[in-house]
DNA sequence: GACGTGGCAGCAAGCGCTTTCTATACCGTC
DNA sequence: GACGGTATAGAAAGCGCTTGCTGCCACGTC
């Protein structure tokens, strides 16, 4: 039926051991023998049995990438960058690794289950992207799992997620707080005093940090925040649309809306426009992330650029052991304020 | 070191066979025994060894999803839908499967290598998304590979990709030609006679089909096409931007620009605007796909909506054997023309 | 010419699980 | 009370590969 190592060995008139060594190239094999083996492999169209190989060698060539939402370019860009460094087929790395991205959909259970599945496959490395969920119980379970993975020799890297102390994981954490603060300060400098904030889902670190930055900026400028000015939602345009209408209902005098991310900001723009408000003349809008479409919005979106591709690439290299992890196992990745047309001084 | 089945068996005072059966649940085990085993599993924190299990059972729970560009929501949306039906953790399917998405980056070699890697892992199913590459040699290699996968029992489904005859693959093909034709006909009905077309990469089926539809519409209305009106590029906004400037240079009298997809259309809009042209007053713009951001563009983009999520979900179900494949192994998935603000009658 | 030394290839023992076949025990039945 | 039947557990043979160790041969050295 299916061709095995032994078949190849028979055809090449060598022992299975030799074939294995030719294929793995980590043991001296005479050139003539190697050629004979390769020829047999080719003729028989042999494909290594991954599970068998993983079992015998006690390692696999799988690398897992966990993302919260694969349909969101925020994660797509990171995943793409990570994967290009993992090597995968055609990548610059040597061994061929199967970089697999797993979509948790933001669900704690799926996150955990995927980790178990990866652990089960004896993954060589795992990269977790994006914000973490802040539930204490879930966090404990995650940390335990990460610890176990690390102990089993799987390299664990967090990309855009806060450090998980005592888990052996390397963290490349986005400075969401700093970025959020800078963004709101920009708005305040423009003269805004009544700012709506559309936050992401409550229990996400990303959400909390960006919001904390926003509030820090308000506090630093002595602006007292009205609880009506903050609305929570999901990280998508629809949510931004709904939340904006809600904000407008609560306080029509807002002169600026800060969104959890660019998609939300886009939805906010649509809602404002439908409400007959001009951007930025009547209301300024700001996003976060600087995804590719943000510059094409009309007006172009003021936002905080996160170096997603760079961070992903670095995470990938660290996961492959091709770059030294940062000192202390954690590095902060800063964002950059991009001032564009969607923000201006308030009317009047 | 690591906990094995045997350890669990010892602890539960049963044989390894029994533990295996409890875990797989496909053989009668007395309730009391099962409980004892489960308790031991829990206490020892046992995690099944995937490779060993796959080796012994000669099947794995891996399902591969190949995408051309994971950073593009077009693929992200499909991947997300496919994966939700695959079951993955928390999905509605029974067994826990590891749905993995592999990013080929549009490279033929990587596509092939990923398929080999998946074959190596003895994947349970493989879903290929998006357009295929039209190189004859590559196509032959792909078909051979798909055939081999199918023969080995891997279910192969093509989602948004033309049928690959004699490979045993099921195809859900997007009607790119029909959509393209409808879109251009809409423009012609509005009165446009000089239409620029920004096509995708030359060697892609998607590119060719959409372009053919466009040309069919022109021909049907007796409009002779000027070769200067077509420019090829990539499927991203940058490309749309550049191509539009090029089109304008070649023929400033164009009254409409049809783009290969929505991202390209967005880039086109930006370029037109920078050139001092208004949309749709001076030039109409149309996209393809109807990605989430397209409705938020200003003006909102006229485009052809492709039911990405629906098609992906169906592909996923077929891959899991939970839905009958279409008769003949192929089904056409139609797009729907979405007329919005970016198209209008030509000036004057 | 005997011996030491590399360079290569083969043997064989697993890796941790699944599954067929067999064994046991207990039940009801005539 | 012997027998067939049913329900459940165990023994053991792999699944296809890797790798430590051994063995052989050819060469160079004194």
Image (spheres, coloured by chain):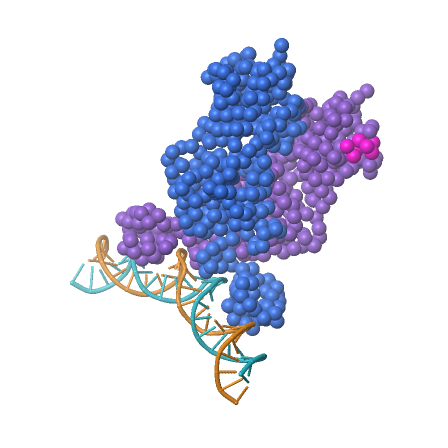
Chain colours: A purple, B blue, C cyan, D orange
Q: Please state the horizontal and vertical placement of residue B122, each as a whole percent of the image.
A: 45, 51
Q: Quadrant of the N terminus of chain A?
A: bottom left
Is A248 contained in the magenta span?
A: yes
Q: Nearer the viewer, residue A194 or B219?
A: B219
Name the residue nearer the viewer: B335 or A266: B335
Q: Is residue A340 above or below residue B153?
A: above
**Residue B234: image location, x then y, percent:** 51, 28
Say which residue appears at 55% left-offset and 52% top-offset: B97
* Residue B26, image quadrant: bottom right
The percent position of residue C7, horizontal first and vertical second, equals: 29, 52
Q: Quadrant of the C terminus of chain A?
A: top right
Q: Is residue B144 visible?
A: yes
Q: Is residue B261 left or right of residue B148?
A: right
Residue positioned 59% across, 46% down in the render: B84
Q: Which residues are magenta?
A: A245-251
Q: Residue A262 falls in which quadrant of the image?
A: top right
Residue A275 percent across, percent down from the top left? 77, 26
Residue shown at the point (40%, 47%) measured from the top left: B148
- State the residue lying farthest toward the top: B348
Q: Is residue A217 visible?
A: no
Q: In the image, is B238 to the left or to the right of C6?
A: right
Q: Nearer the viewer, residue D4 or B306?
A: D4
What is the magenta segment's predominant secondary structure? helix
Q: Is residue B76 above or below residue A56?
A: above
Q: Is residue B229 left or right of residue A185?
A: left
């Amino acid at each position: 039926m299916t061709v095995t190592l032994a078949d190849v060995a028979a055809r090449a008139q060598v022992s299975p051991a030799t074939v294995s060594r030719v294929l793995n190239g980590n043991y001296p094999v005479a050139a003539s023998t190697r050629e004979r083996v390769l020829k047999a492999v080719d003729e028989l169209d042999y494909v290594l049995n991954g599970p068998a190989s993983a079992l015998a060698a006690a390692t696999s060539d799988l690398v897992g990438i966990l993302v919260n939402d694969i349909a969101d370019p925020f994660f797509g860009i990171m995943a793409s960058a990570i994967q290009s460094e993992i090597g995968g087929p055609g990548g610059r790395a040597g061994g061929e690794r199967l970089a697999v991205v797993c979509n948790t959909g933001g669900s704690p259970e799926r996150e955990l289950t995927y980790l178990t599945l990866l652990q089960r496959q004896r993954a060589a490395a795992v990269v977790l992207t994006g914000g973490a969920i802040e539930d204490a119980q879930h966090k404990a379970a995650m940390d335990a799992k990460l610890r176990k993975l690390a102990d089993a020799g799987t390299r664990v890297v967090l990309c855009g997620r806060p450090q998980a102390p005592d888990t052996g994981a390397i963290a490349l954490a986005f400075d969401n707080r700093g970025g959020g603060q800078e963004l709101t300060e920009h708005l305040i400098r423009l003269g805004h005093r009544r700012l709506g904030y559309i936050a992401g889902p409550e229990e996400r670190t990303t959400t909390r940090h960006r919001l904390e930055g926003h509030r820090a900026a308000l506090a630093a400028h002595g602006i007292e925040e009205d609880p009506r000015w903050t609305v929570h939602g999901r990280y998508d345009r629809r949510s931004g649309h709904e939340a904006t209408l809600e904000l407008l209902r609560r306080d029509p005098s807002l002169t600026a809306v800060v969104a959890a991310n660019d998609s939300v900001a886009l939805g906010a723009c649509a809602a404002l426009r439908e409400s007959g408000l001009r951007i930025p003349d009547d209301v300024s809008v700001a996003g976060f992330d600087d995804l590719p479409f943000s510059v094409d919005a009309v007006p172009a979106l003021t936002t905080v650029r996160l170096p997603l591709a760079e961070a992903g690439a670095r995470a990938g290299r660290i996961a492959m052991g091709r770059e030294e992890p940062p000192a202390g196992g954690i590095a902060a990745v800063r964002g950059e304020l991009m001032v564009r047309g969607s923000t201006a001084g308030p009317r009047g």
